[in-house]
Image (cartoon, helix red, strand yellow):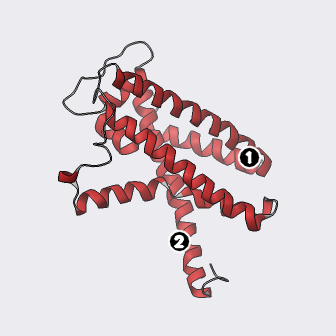
Amino acid sequence: MQRGINPHVGFVAGWLILLDYVFVPSLLYSLVAAWCVELVPAVPFVAWIILFVVINTTINVRGIESTAKADWVMFIIEIGILLFFIIMGLKFVFSGGGAGELSINPFYQPGKINLGFIASATSIACLSFLVFDGISTLAEETVNPEKTVGRGILISLVAIGIIFILQTYVATLFCQIGRTPIKVQNSLMLLHLLQVNASRLYFLW
């Protein structure tokens, strides 16, 4: 930014990125801690945050190789959870719950589109796509960074976008208000948690 556009622009951008790296982890710790308190009420909110900070700090202090391995483990776990969420959500919808069928309503609702609706969607989208730029900070540890970093950012952005759209689409289908309520049956505990804590978990998603 400093070399490509202007030194002053680069200065401002650098400080904004620093604020981003301070704000985003704090927000994520708070959101995940709030969700964990719902799952395990006996453990206080502050204890969850301290636990996450200790784990994250320990991994980062051990070096880039340790961080890369931890990232792969978390990536595999996240993909597994997302697949479980999507499969169980579609199974619930196709069995008659929620919307009861696939619909374009989550994508297109002419009567509800207004400035407030667009502003809300934009804020969620910006918050959900903040961290992909973190790839650029690994340029010094990357082979052929001139090509690899840019390609990695674009690929990750497309992949994250597809996953985000898919999971929110499924969540919208089975959380239809006024339709069949979700009950606890077998492995649908996750869906039950989403239904019981609809307003809070909708914000988290």
Instruction: Describe residue 167's horizontal placement relative to residue 69 as left or right.
Output: left
Point out the frontmost of discs 1 and 2: 1
Residue 134 screen position, x and y as percent:
62, 59
User: Is the C-beta separation of discs 1 and 2 under 8 Å?
Assistant: no
What residue is shown with label 1?
68
Q: CA distance from mark 1 to mark 2?
A: 25 Å
Mark seen at residue 44: none
**Can see residue 33?**
yes
Instruction: Report the number of numbered marks.
Output: 2
Instruction: Describe residue 192's horizontal placement relative to residue 149 as left or right.
Output: left
Observer-nearest residue: 68 or 31? 68
Determine whether 166 is above or below 187 in the image: below
Mark seen at residue 16: 2
Quarter of the figure that contains the C terminus: top left
Kindly identify the amino acid type of the residue bearing the numbered disc 1: Ala
> Residue, x 50% and y 50% (percent of image)?
161
**Can see residue 63?**
no
Residue 85 screen position, x and y as percent:
47, 30
**In the picture, residue 171 is in which quadrant?**
top left
> Residue, x 60% and y 80% (percent of image)?
10
Determine whether 23 is above or below 79 in the image: below
The residue at the far right in this view is 143
> Residue, x 35% and y 45% (percent of image)?
203
Quarter of the figure that contains the N terminus: bottom right
Observer-nearest residue: 107 or 125? 107
Residue 152 screen position, x and y as percent:
67, 57
Residue 167 screen position, x and y as percent:
44, 39
Determine whether the residue tagged by mark 1 lies in a helix, strand or loop: helix
Instruction: Describe residue 145's horizontal placement relative to residue 125 as left or right.
Output: right
Determine whether the residue tagged by mark 2 lies in a helix, strand or loop: helix
Q: Earlier in the sequence, mark 1 or mark 2?
A: 2
